[in-house]
């Protein structure tokens, strides 16, 4: 069935990653992971960590640490990262345009979900910073997924929460792992470079289009993949 044959009344939606996409937190996560690794004797370059931010913490640790390590420390390292990151909560801020982007999607008739794999407490802090609950229909956290990104579990949970099929959704994210998770479900992914990953890398990972951040996407919304989805809202 082509787009022109889509039955009226079909629910459509847009999923948003949060860390690095709507909230300027990617580098704070990087330095928190760096500190956690150093606490347990691992000196991992920040550049290596940053590229993997957005991947699930379990996968990030497994990708960066030696295969022969004492794996019983993995959970402790992840908890250390969480504690160090929490110390940065007061420094968190939303990117320019984040609230406006959520508002315009909501006003246009799209169901809006935050497809985040953050810890529940981190998610609540970030939702408070966004101050956009009126425009958000659902939000996920790490507890909603069995497997972390690049597995698509979080996106599947977000789609279920808003009652939208993958064919009627768009996903916005800042990391390679966001693009791969969306591809696993056949959801077009829009990339943003505000998390620190370049446009070329995001496109290579599957992004259908790339913007500098939420404000850039808002400014170009009409011609974007989201704009095309808005035009299909019955």
Image (cartoon, rainbow, N blue to C red):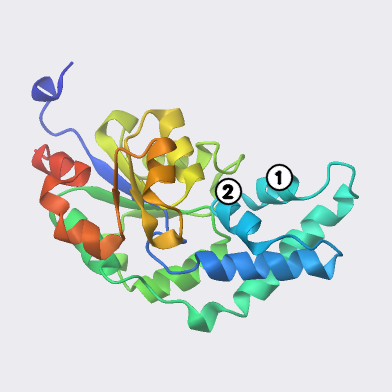
Q: Quadrant of residue 34?
A: bottom right
User: Which x, y percent locates residue 169?
Assistant: 29, 38
Residue at the image position 80 percent from the left and 61 percent from the top: 76
Q: Residues within 10 Å of mark 1 (few under 14, many from 20)?
A: some
Q: Tell me whether circle 2 and circle 1 mark residues in contact (CB < 8 Å).
A: yes
Tell me where residue 63 appears, x and y as whole percent: 71, 45
Image side of residue 40 versus residue 105, left or right: right
Quadrant where the image shows the C terminus: top left
**CA distance separating discs 2 and 1:** 10 Å
Q: Which residue is mark 2?
A: 55
The percent coordinates of residue 195 (x first, y second) are: 44, 60
Q: Secondary structure at mark 2?
A: loop
Q: Secondary structure beneath disc 1?
A: helix
Residue that label 1 marks: 63
- Can you name the residue that lies furthest to the top here? 1
- In the image, residue 140 above or below residue 188: below
Q: Nearer the viewer, mark 2 or mark 1?
A: 1
Between 177 and 198, which is closer to the camera in this rendering? 198
In the picture, measured across the screen, residue 70 lies left or right of residue 205, that is right
Label 2 packing within 10 angstroms: few (<14), some (14-19), many (20+): many
Residue at horizontal 39%, vertical 62%?
Answer: 194
Q: Is residue 153 visible?
A: yes
Q: Hey, which quadrant is residue 68 in on the image?
A: top right
């Amino acid at each position: 069935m082509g787009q022109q044959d889509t039955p009226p009344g079909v629910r459509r939606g847009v999923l948003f990653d949060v860390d690095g996409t709507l909230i300027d937190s990617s580098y704070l996560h990087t330095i928190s992971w760096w500190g956690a690794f150093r606490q347990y004797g691992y000196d991992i370059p920040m550049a290596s960590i940053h590229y993997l931010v957005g991947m699930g913490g379990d996968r990030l640790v497994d990708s960066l640490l030696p295969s022969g390590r004492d794996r019983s420390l993995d959970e402790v390292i992840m908890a250390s990262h969480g504690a160090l990151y929490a110390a940065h909560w007061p420094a968190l801020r939303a990117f320019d345009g984040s609230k406006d982007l959520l508002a315009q999607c909501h006003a246009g008739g799209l169901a809006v979900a935050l497809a985040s794999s953050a810890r529940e407490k981190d998610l609540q802090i970030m939702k408070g910073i966004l101050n956009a609950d009126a425009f958000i229909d659902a939000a996920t956290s790490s507890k909603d997924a069995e497997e972390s990104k690049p597995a698509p579990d979080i996106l599947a949970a977000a789609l279920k929460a808003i009652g939208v099929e993958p064919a009627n959704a768009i996903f916005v994210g800042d990391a390679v792992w966001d693009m791969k998770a969306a591809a696993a479900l056949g959801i077009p992914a829009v990339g943003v470079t505000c998390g620190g990953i370049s446009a070329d890398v995001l496109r290579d990972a599957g992004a259908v289009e790339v913007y500098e951040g939420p404000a850039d996407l808002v400014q170009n919304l009409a011609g974007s993949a989201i704009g095309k989805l808005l035009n299909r809202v019955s």
